[in-house]
Amino acid sequence: MELTKSAALFSSARNLIPGGVNSPVRACGSVGGEPVFIEKGEGARIFDADGNTYIDYVLSWGPLILGHRPAPVVEALKKVLESGTSFGAPTALENKLAQLVVDSVASVDMIRMVNSGTEATMSAIRLARGVTGRDLIVKFDGCYHGHADTLLVAAGSGVATLGIPGSPGVPADVIRNTLSLPYNDIQSFERLMADRGKEIACVILEPVAGNMGMVAPDPLFLKVLRQQTAAYGSLLIFDEVMTGFRVGGRACAQGYFDIDPDLTCFGKVIGGGLPVGAYGGKREIMQQIAPGGSIYQAGTLSGNPLAMAAGIATLKTLENDQLYADMDRRADMLIKGLQAAADEANIPFSAGHFGSMAGFFFTGRKVRNFNDAKTCDLDRFAKFYRGMLAKGIYLAPSQFEACFISAAHTDEDIETTLDAARKVMTEI
Ligand code: PMP
């Protein structure tokens, strides 16, 4: 596979942009390679600067649930460009996207748009602290909630991939109020609540974790979180930046697991590939945000027309249940096929999916938390990643990430992927 143009672009990028990338995992360092530079996307495929084609299971890290350049989103963007790109004043489009989310997600009465998942979680945490008058927050090891100071503790995604415990530049004083516990560990959570429950402003988690690889929650764990937070007057925040409108369809992961969080963070899918985040929840809580309330949060480009139009077109298209059913079935084909290929090659492997969010680990054990995930054979993952890339299959370049199926993936795409996997598994 020819990658000379990508190599030249990466070389000049490294002089201009730290590490050559605008977000760390893109550098592909942990899998011992360099990134391919993408020129174009169409449906389930991306095309790099050297003219190579890949079936894409990254989908811009989740947002592109309809694939690249879906017609409804392209049309909506063209149309909105005729009117303007940003006004810094309210538009009807903001009402429309808010309404679509409120109508779909049972726990959300009101929603505030921001520009990224990081902003959504950061703002939700401030709101929870403001509302409760408490400082302590609880998160779980291996969950990633963006790069705000308070949340960069035992974080997943790029922090896990790079193997750094937190980040220099985050004052110890700031993270003194962040407690991180093992995911799915009911006992340690109950112990903490018994000790300090009345000091805890909120508990935030990914309802299906996707940033330590994909890790399923124990449904009882989610129930206990809901019961205990309610008992101690702490807020429960579901970070559905990745799972929102993907796991559990339009009802999101909270609908799938039948849990009613106080606040929910969104991003990715609700922006249809443009920069969007949002946080929403119970009316009495959301009304405490400025200007109605005193808890401050703002944004120059928040709710901008391009982002709203892409999000509206995406969520409207997702009103077709068949799309979710097809993605679920294809994710199942993919995961079962990968497991069979690994079994055939005698490679310890475990895999799963929730709807179109999928994950696999090079370990024989069932992965229930970050410690389990860290037992994976990272060398073998790196070989698998490179082997698949060479065969035109674009996976996330880290064992600690999920993979995604879009409505544009076909049965044939999955078969092509599995053909590649069967060959690569015998070589690693
Ligand atoms: N929360 C979760 C669950 C995420 O997966 C991510 C990003 N992968 C974020 C928050 C942060 O979102 P962003 O990168 O848009 O700031």
Image (cartoon, rainbow, N blue to C red):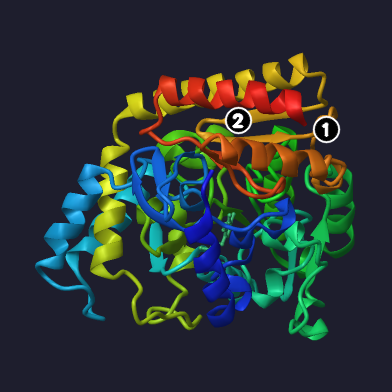
Location of residue 254 (image quadrant): top right
Amino acid marked by disc 1 = Thr
Q: Which amino acid lies under the numbered mark 2 shown in the image of this protein?
A: His
Q: Residues within 10 Å of mark 2 (few under 14, many from 20)?
A: many
Residue 19 % position (x, y): 63, 73
345 shown above or below 132: above
Quadrant into which the C terminus falls: top right
Residue shown at 84%/44% (left/top)?
A: 185
Q: Farthest residue toward the left? A: 82
**Quadrant of the rendering where the N terminus is positioned:** top right
Left or right for 262, reference 78: right
Nearest to the eye among marks 1 and 2: give it: 1
Q: Nearer the viewer, residue 240 or 393?
A: 393
Distance CA(mark 1)–CA(mark 2): 16 Å
Q: Tell me which residue sits at (63%, 70%) in the image.
A: 147
Residue at (42% x, 56% y) in the render: 49
Mark identifier at residue 353: 2
Rendered image: mark on residue 363: 1
User: Which quadrant would residue 98 be assigned to in this image?
Assistant: bottom left
